[in-house]
Image (tube, rainbow, N blue to C red):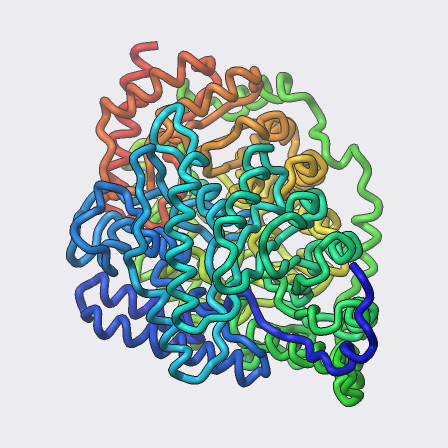
Amino acid sequence: MTIASNETTTAAKTVTHILGYPRVGSQRELKFAQERYWRGESDQAQLKQVGKDLRHRHWNDQIKAGLDYVAVGDFAWYDHVLGTSMLLGHIPTRHQQGFPDLDTLFSVARGKAPTGCTCAAADMTKWFNTNYHYIVPEFTAEDSFNVSWQQLFEEVAEAKKAGYNVKPVLLGPVFYLWLGKEKQQGFDRLTLLPRLLTAYQQILTKLAALGVEWVQIDEPALALELPREWAASFKLAYQVLHGGPKLLLTTYFDDISHQLAVISQLSVDGLHIDLSAAPAQLAAVTEAIPDHWVLSAGVINGRNVWRADLAEWLTCLQPIKQQLGANLWLASSCSLLHSPLDVDSETDLDADVRQWLAFAKQKCGEITLLAQALDGDQNAVAECAAYSASIKDRLSCERVNNLQVQQRTAAITPQWAERDLPYSERAIQQQHALQLPLLPTTTIGSFPQTTTIRSQRSDFKAGRLTESDYNQALQTHIQEAITRQHRLGLDVLVHGEAERNDMVEYFAEQLEGFVVTQYGWVQSYGSRCVKPAIIVSDIYRAQPMTVEWIRYAQSLTTQLVKGMLTGPVTILGWTFAREDLSREAIANQIALALRDEVTDLQAAGIKIIQIDEPAIREGLPLKQSQWQEYLDWAVKAFKISAAGAAPQTQIHTHMCYSEFNQIIASVAALDADVITIETSRSDMDLLKAFEAFAYPNEIGPGVYDIHSPNIPDVDTITALIDKATTLIPIERLWINPDCGLKTRNWTETEAALTNMVTAAHILREKY
Ligand code: GLN
Ligand code: ZN
């Protein structure tokens, strides 16, 4: 790339934009409107009005913050991948009934809608390694694509009419295919690309007719280590799409420099890179891209909540600005969908912490300020320095640094991660100590979070219920859970997790080092949002977190009660982490806090302790070549949390997903005495990975799907366990549901568990 002349650089204003904005609204308006509509309490017109108001509010936020473009098409009624399927007229055949409308969309997502068909919903899966879930497109050889749903064009017209400078956001064609899965054996979805491109051409032509100059086209799969034929497909795709509106090819979440040979050949007009996730790629990318391209520098982290160090970015980008002039754009690293909306609503956070944070609204302001500074505005330069001062002060702040925690973490030796005896010897001691029958039955931890429990908790939080009344109420729920489990005849009991709003937030509230927000909601899927806690400082456990609840539960029964903890990798994965410490170091701090809890539970007489790690798999880096490094420290953190347990104490872990093939060695390395996993939907097939690996410890393959209200019958469960015994020796099998039961009601739960226990009894007779 050649150096632009000085003349152009001084006059060249840096263009600013974001890749997308949170869509649910500050009060989760979209969520409530959707749910009202699904319950039949409002009509489509009312729902659409809520969406329209939100879009206008969010565009206005972007303009008020001073951004040059508003992102349009980032809004979604359920999910933007599903929105793309609708735009392309690409819906599973079972959901096709006339012209696709909002109810078609909801029926694909949820399996039902106020009108339209009731048939199997499409699968949902994680969006890279975030906690956002998208609806998986289904591909068959017969698929066709016809631009049908007008939502995108209506939104563009809406924004144009309001006078905004519009930049539509599209998922790229290769990425759209990448995200989906084939519904036919032996079929290769990439062969659909030519057909798909025709539809994309039509979309781009329509956008051009609406007066659109730039389109953001997302191809973040370029950050992965793609199979060769996939990497090669971009060239054709962009040759075909070239010629309409200008295309800004967007990548995010990781480095793309390994694909620069492919990318720099594409017929596009600009490239967006995520410099927050992968700052080191800047030089190579700047060097490689053609002179006439725009480079959109994604510097403001869309996936975390911290203020950006604007002063540092300014220094880093000044030479690039010199070089690129008007061709340098500034942006968020990725869509702000993954960020909460507005720090200013967090009135309960103390002022110290608040000045360290920037949510979506503030991030837009950061982009503008940095651009002004880059363009030579001296007031902005000074403001950047002042803005970043608080996060620099934070680093030496006493509240953040806890010497004791740091010393303890530094003193961790490999020994800390190892139990005193190998599994084979522990198993003998545990058999002796626990006296469990063949095929022991248990559950994964939570029982129904009834409306009573939830309203008691909100009464307590609002001060309408005293702490002792609240604790009393929780004890009653525990009593009830124990009584029901006695009646059901389960072998290993749980206390039911009534005290937990959420399996991570509960621990974040108990541990030192976290803050929780009031309104920091982030969309997880559809109308569901999560409110991740924020790790602000060194983590430690000031006092036991679960011991009293479990001890109480154990006092009510002579049977074994299983202690219930959330593991270090999951607590880390489902919170906003600090960035001045490695993820490994943070995981170790959490692990030490949990280790103390494990020892305290054990001292309180608890003989079985479960440490849940449902998030280990989703934390895998985008590039497979980096998996092992991550798995190594993740496994170690888990083991540190567990290894304080004596040999006769049985450590369980739980993971709820069904893809273990590539990580089975690490799962085995956790060395948990028992692992419970989700298997019912895979018809026990996933146990084959365990069998092939000769997985040595005990396994509880889930025997029914807790996500469905259907009651599994005894025969189905018996058949599944029979199948499991062909893959895993029967003396190492446990019987349990796929996951926790907090989202079910008691009627469903008791009916399902009755059948599960009956199946176990039948099989004990048989074997
Ligand atoms: N113990 C937790 C529960 O039962 C586990 C939840 C999970 O795996 N997501 O709810
Ligand atoms: Zn689970």
Give above or below for 464 relative to 239: below
Give above or below for 553 relative to 273: above
Percent position (x, y) of residue 453?
35, 60
Can you tell me which quadrant of the image ligand 1 is in?
A: top left
Question: Residue most toward the top?
Answer: 767
Q: Is residue 245 left or right of residue 413?
A: left
In the image, 245 versus 113, the foreground residue is: 245
Q: How many marks?
A: 0
In the image, 491 versus 111, the foreground residue is: 111
Percent position (x, y) of residue 609?
54, 38
Question: Residue most toward the front?
Answer: 243
Percent position (x, y) of residue 341?
52, 73
Quadrant the N terminus occupies: bottom right
Residue shown at the point (32%, 55%) measured from the top left? 147
Q: Does residue 603 appear in the picture of this structure?
A: no
Quadrant the C terminus occupies: top left
Q: Is residue 338 left or right of residue 587?
A: left
Q: Does residue 517 appear in the picture of this structure?
A: yes
In the image, 505 versus 690, the foreground residue is: 690
Residue shown at the point (63%, 46%) measured from the top left? 223
Give above or below for 631 relative to 208: above
Residue shown at the point (55%, 44%) measured from the top left? 234
Residue shown at the point (23%, 66%) measured from the top left? 37
Q: Is residue 564 left or right of residue 274?
A: left
Percent position (x, y) of residue 164?
47, 81
Q: Quadrant of residue 575?
A: bottom right
